[in-house]
Amino acid sequence: MATIATNHTSASQLFKRLNSYTKSHPLYKALQEFGRIIKSIFILSYYHDVELRQRIQKQLNRVEQTNKFSNAVFFDNDQAFQDGTKEEQELSTACMVLIQNCIILWNYMYLSNLILDTEDMEQRSAIIEAITQGSVITWAHVNLRGEYDFTRKAANDPKFDYQKIKQLKLS
């Protein structure tokens, strides 16, 4: 433990070495018991602390929402690569991430614009509070399976005032 604390070795190196010994090695047993103590303390804290449970549940909901978002963007072939080389699969994954990032960026830009366009400070505070309690990972407003027409002039007009958004500072 001291070698880990003083950065002389990493925990993974220590456990790799311990795994080469038998399970009856005294240090291995001691670390197992120490881990059980930490786990027991966490479980007792989890049962006792309502706020901790709520924070954990909120984080689990965010992870689940992120997984649903990935499935929504990568909807073809039951979210599975049917064939292709490793490079083609990596390209498909990179494209999916790019699309996800574009959607999230658009959401941030839209919400920033909404804050800037709201002049009532009480209403602005309510919007900011809703944003901080929610998530920008939302896609119901995005046409993921339709046709896009970028030839119309209105489709290419800037929707957001980027200079104004860049100057936006939330306290």
Image (cartoon, rainbow, N blue to C red):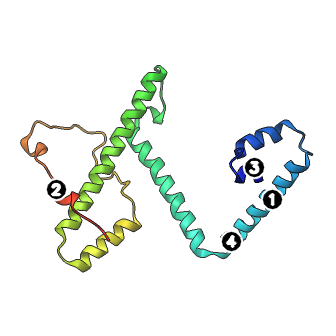
How busy is the neighbourhood of tag 1: few (under 14 within 10 Å), some, or many (20 plus)?
few
Q: Which is more N-terminal, label 1 or label 3?
A: 3
Asked whether the beta carbons under mark 1 and mark 2 sit within 8 Å of each other, the answer is no
User: Distance from label 1 to label 2 (Cα)?
Assistant: 54 Å
SS at mark 4 in the image: helix
User: Distance from label 1 to label 4 (Cα)?
Assistant: 17 Å
Provide residue 38's location: percent of width, then percent of height: 74, 62
Q: Please name the amino acid that badge 2 sits on.
A: Gln
SS at mark 3 in the image: helix
Q: Which is more N-terminal, label 4 or label 3?
A: 3
Provide residue 85's location: percent of width, then percent of height: 47, 19
Q: Which residue is mark 3?
A: 3
In this rendering, which labeled residue sits more in front, label 4 or label 2?
A: 2
Q: Which is more N-terminal, label 4 or label 1?
A: 1
Residue 1 appears in the picture as rendered: no
Q: Please name the amino acid that badge 1 sits on.
A: Phe
